[in-house]
Image: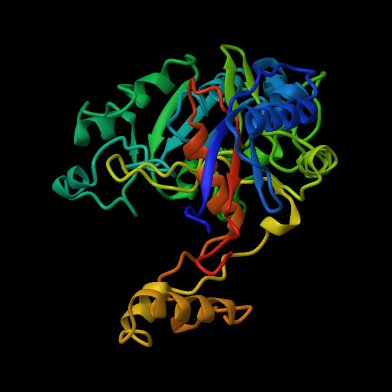
Amino acid sequence: MRLTGVTARGIITPIFKQGDDLVASICQSVRAASEGEGFALGDGDIIGVTEAVVARTQGNYASCGQIAEDIRAKLGGKDMGIVFPILSRNRFSIMLKAIAMSCEKLYIQLSYPTDEVGNALISLDLVDEKSVNPYSDSFNNDEFRKVFGYDTVHRFTGIDYIEYYNSFADNIEIVFSNDPKHILKYTKNVLNCDVHSRFRTQRILKSSGAEKSFRLDQILTKSVKGSGYNEKYGLLGSNKATEDKVKLFPRDTDAFVQNLSDAMREATGKSIEVMVYGDGGFKDPVGGIWELADPVVSPSHTDRLKGTPNELKMKYFADNEFSNLSGESLASAMKKKIREKEDSLVGSMQSQGTTPRRLADLLGSLCDLISGSGDRGTPVVLIQGYFSNFASE
């Protein structure tokens, strides 16, 4: 009988470089882990591959000069503004360096008290204490400092992002507002840098008089002077690679997941699902930072990973319909109920309290937590038993 449910393992792999055969290497690493540590591979197992190694083996990189070239061509190269950038050395600093190179005058509009994903400049309590309305009140740099002072150091990174972003070039001026239209007081040429609210922000900017309006996912959608690129996401999902280069979100991931799934079937005879994952979709309860700075949790996954879970709430039945049962009688009744559940439980009390999220988002978040972002050396995650339940034999 089964004694465990879902298990997830980080798979140690070689350190991947540009040009490596990622499909063959992952296939070999997963099989070696299975044989070396004594667990069997099965139908319905899931392999998650971090987007970073897919992009790295593709050589999907771009330099500051290449990024600046594209921005200059689209925004004009004179005065321009950027709206709502994330406060991040890894995610935005190299892009900011390139943006500053692309124009003569750059206005940076920061949101407050936090950026889009929860990195705080100041606390909400301080906003209340100063009787500031973040929905309507806007500031230049001196005004912001006069009201809120200099206690703007990020609690985790130890960086004052106002000073840090100001330091990238002499042509930078920082302002603060949560109203996208505020930037239009300084320039009509705007690159909005938010991730998940980017389409709304651009719509507001265009309807309010922006003359040249672009989003980060509209920069580097094709190669510029030999650069990497991403047709769908542009610069979104980029990470710092060197002091002059970013690694872009990977391309052609639909083909990659299918190729790896096919290779695993050929090597093992098993039907194994595959996904590419980036940031997980979870929020830090202490710092309030929402992890998802990528445009999506999973840019590509095989077909079985589409949709949402369809699960009964076992404790609902234990406390209601089966409240008079216990032991083996309760277990048998519960298994029968699970086997007979409807194909869709949306809106049913029987599923109330289960997680109403997409499978790919749940699985990608699990993969991100397992693999980590530092020195574990496990950019591949094997998930087993995910499609099992209490009634599975």
Q: Looking at the picture, does residue 84 appear above or below residue 128?
A: above
The residue that appears at 74% across and 23% down in the rendered structure is: 57
Estimate the x, y position of residue 263 in percent, counting from the top left: 83, 38
Residue name at image x 81 percent, y 44 percent: 265
Where is residue 44 shown, x and y percent of the image? 68, 53
Give left or right: position of 217 versus 153: right
Q: Is residue 228 visible?
A: no
Q: Is residue 310 above or below residue 44?
A: below
Question: Who is closer to the viewer here, 332 or 144?
Answer: 332
Q: What quarter of the picture does the C terminus occupy?
A: bottom right
Left or right placement of residue 23 versus residue 105 in this view: right
Query: From this viewpoint, which residue is outermost toward the left?
Result: 129
Q: Residue at x 31, y 87 (%)?
A: 324
Q: Residue furthest top?
A: 243
Q: Quadrant of residue 149?
A: top left
What residue is drawn where x is 51% and y is 75%?
Answer: 335
Tell which of 312 and 117 is nearer to you.
Answer: 312
Please name whichever residue, 93 or 208, is drawn nearer the observer in this view of the structure: 93
Residue 79 x/y as whole percent: 58, 28
Inspect this view and state whether residue 192 appears: yes
Q: Nearer the viewer, residue 239 or 17?
A: 17
Q: Is residue 5 above or below residue 61?
A: below
Picture coordinates of residue 214 (x, y %)? 66, 41
